[in-house]
Image: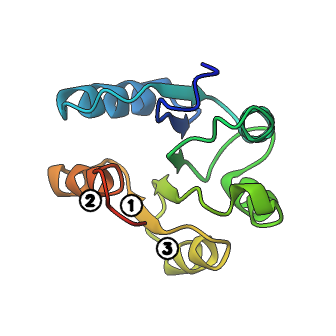
Amino acid sequence: MVADSNVPRLLLVEDDENDGFFFRRAFKRSGFAYPLDHVFHGRAAIEFLEAAAKSNTLPKVVFLDLKLPVLNGFDVLAWMQKQPALAPVPVIVLSGSEQQQDKDRARKLGAVDYLVKPLKAEDLQRLLGYLLPGADS
């Protein structure tokens, strides 16, 4: 994690190597130059966010899978909801689940958006809307 709080960072929490690769590739092709940190399970996400809060280097957006080892995405969302320092960080769920109950639960736990994998071009455009200067999430 870079300690420069002036550089917007993004966090991808995704355990599947292929999904992570395709997300990073699509993001790079989009032209955004924000550094993208990638962790592979829920516990690592919490550790990353704790350190980021302490060093004032919170990510601009967290992209969160739900089906993760160690702690799942719902656990991460529930933990984040209890952390006042993380309130300004939008969380976008990227999940293979199309179940309405998962969508509703994620939103209830604070997710600002829920996209079903694999992502389509229009999904990427929605994601990029969270990253544009002046865009409020």
Q: How many dots with numbers?
A: 3
Q: Indicate which disc, 1 or 2, sits on the residue closer to the N terminus.
A: 1
Q: Is residue 38 above or below residue 122?
A: above
Identify which amino acid the numbered label 1 is placed on: Leu
Check disc 1 and report its element: helix, strand or loop: strand
Mark 2, residues whose alpha carbon is within 10 Å: few (<14), some, or many (≥20)? few
Tell whether 18 sits left or right of 132. right
Residue 135 in the image: x percent, y percent?
A: 32, 61
Identify which amino acid the numbered label 3 is placed on: Gln
Check disc 2 and report its element: helix, strand or loop: helix
Q: Is residue 100 above or below residue 38?
A: below
The CA span between labels 1 and 3 is: 11 Å
Residue position marked by numbered label 2 in the rendering: 126
Q: Indicate which disc, 1 or 3, sits on the residue closer to the N terminus.
A: 3
Instruction: Tell me if label 3 and label 2 are in contact, CB under 8 Å.
Output: no
Residue position marked by numbered label 3 in the rendering: 99
Where residue 13 sits, quadrant-wise, is top right
